[in-house]
Amino acid sequence: MSSSLAHVIRLEEVWKTYRVGSEDVHALAGVSVDFPQGSFWAVMGPSGSGKSTLLNLLGCLDRPTRGACFIQGQPTAGVDDDALSEIRLRHLGFIFQSFNLIAQLSVRENIELPLFYLGWDAERSRRRAEELAALVGLQERLEHRPNELSGGQQQRVAIARALANDPQIILADEPTGNLDTATGTQIMEMLQSLNAQGKTVIMVTHEPEIAAYADHRLHIRDGLIDRIESKSQ
Ligand code: ADP
Ligand code: MG
């Protein structure tokens, strides 16, 4: 494999087809795009255009029906579930619109969850969770449950959890969708600072003010790339 491929996310002619009743729904219909290491993207498009499907493929939550997807040079099409989880754990952090924290677990336990799956020992995980909680300003909330926190605080826990394994790629599906403007701005500033540290950030949003944080805007429509707009450097 060429060394350049190892540092990008690449989609080649990717299709994702869902069977709905007796019909095939082509959520993605031949998408090819490179996301270079360290770039910051907003994926935009109407509801139902395939944005979440695209992000789920990038996030190794799913595989393409057809075509090739490479995450840091590793193919995800046709690999088994264990290999897919391995790529996810090693390279990716995921942030969701509805935070997706586990209600029964404390902030600390939520942040430690990926580390548990990676086999970290308890003491090392504990230190890492404390370091990340401090990074997102929640060191005083480590023993709280998610429902004792505001929306913005919950999203900061989700960011800490996404960073636990020090991934090079952060994926976010409408990360500010459930937050007020001021809180959303805080979250975007965090994503911007992670990008400035060299992480690749790819987020779905339909809000132009949020998309403005990204360097590239990828517009999709009916499962196809409509256009890409990039800020002039
Ligand atoms: P967006 O995030 O842009 O709103 P999605 O990627 O969620 O769009 O959906 C794209 C298309 O694929 C839609 O027509 C949607 O109904 C369909 N779709 C998405 N997920 C599934 C699924 N699990 N099963 C069947 N159809 C799906
Ligand atoms: Mg969606």
Image (cartoon, grey):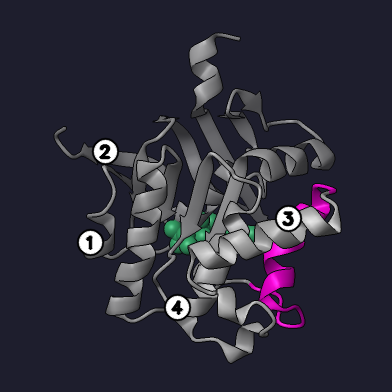
Q: Residues within 10 Å of mark 2 (few under 14, many from 20)?
A: some
Residue at left 49%, top 86%?
A: 150
Instruction: Let me know if residue 205 appears in the view.
Output: no
Q: Which residue is mark 3?
A: 114
Q: Which residue is mark 2?
A: 228
Q: Name above or below for residue 188 compared with residue 141.
A: above
Q: Which residue is mark 1?
A: 208
Kind of residue sitting beneath label 2:
Ile
Numbered tag placed on residue 152 in the rendering: 4
Q: Quadrant of the N terminus?
A: top right
Answer with the quarter of the image where residue 225 lies.
top left
Q: Residues within 10 Å of mark 1 (few under 14, many from 20)?
A: few
Q: Which residues are magenta?
A: 101-119
> Is residue 200 on the magenta stretch?
no
Kind of residue sitting beneath label 1:
Pro
Q: Residues within 10 Å of mark 3 (few under 14, many from 20)?
A: many
Residue at left 68%, top 39%?
A: 90
For the residues carrying marks 2 and 1, which lies nearer the camera in this image?
A: 1
Some atom of ligand 1 lies within 8 Å of the CB belonging to the residue at label 1: no
Q: Quadrant of the C terminus?
A: top left
